[in-house]
Amino acid sequence: MTEKMDQFTRLGFRRVGAWKLAGLNLACDLEEKDPHGNFIYAFVIRDQVKFLEYSRAPLEARMDAYRHTDHRYAGTFQPMNKRLREKILAALEDGEVVEIWAFYPGEMDYEGYRLDLAAGLFDSLVKAFSPEWNGYTR
């Protein structure tokens, strides 16, 4: 395990599934279901974080937006979903394993205000890991 992946797991990220080809389509095997959402997820290839994103939608629904870019969950993120779908498909066609990792940091209260830790940590994690597929730094 690389130093970055060791740091990634120490933060609380865990492998929750992997992408696979289903004919010409994209499918994912999820090892767990999350009905709540509010998490940060990553796509990882050979111990390298390729993409990080924050989601309020449940895990399965968020992954559906990549499998079906015309899906109702795609919403305003549809161009990003299509771009990522193409990257995942290309990696799988090249024989890579594209893992799905997730981190559910929870919430806390600050002076009576709800603090969403996933949303608060997201920008810092993108800066720290510089995922290639994000295509930008915040």
Image (spheres, grey):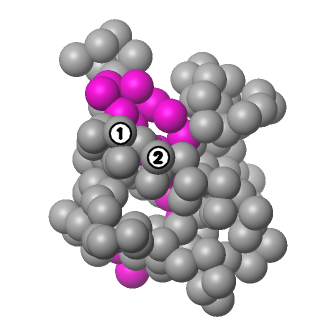
- Residue designated by label 2: 90
The amino acid sitting under disc 1 is Asp
Give the Cα separation between the discs numbered 1 and 2.
6 Å
State whether the magenta stretch is mostly helix, strand or loop. strand
Was residue 37 drawn as part of the magenta stretch in this picture?
yes
Q: Residue at x 30, y 72 (%)?
A: 23
Which residue corresponds to mark 1? 94
Work out whether residue 136 can be spotted.
Answer: yes
Q: Is residue 101 left or right of residue 134?
A: left
Q: Is residue 104 above or below residue 7?
A: below
Residue in view at x 31 percent, y 63 percent = 21
Q: Residue 116 placed where, x, y %?
A: 63, 56
Assess whether mark 2 and mark 1 are in contact (beta carbons under 8 angstroms).
yes
* Residue 109 image offset from top left, x and y in percent: 62, 56
Q: Determine if residue 11 is in view.
A: no
Disc 2 crowd rating (10 Å Cα; few below 14, some 14-19, many 20+) is few
Amino acid type indicated by mark 2 = Ala
Specify the farthest residue to the bottom.
Answer: 72
Using the rendered view, name the quadrant where residue 16 is placed: bottom left
Magenta stretch: give its range.
34-51
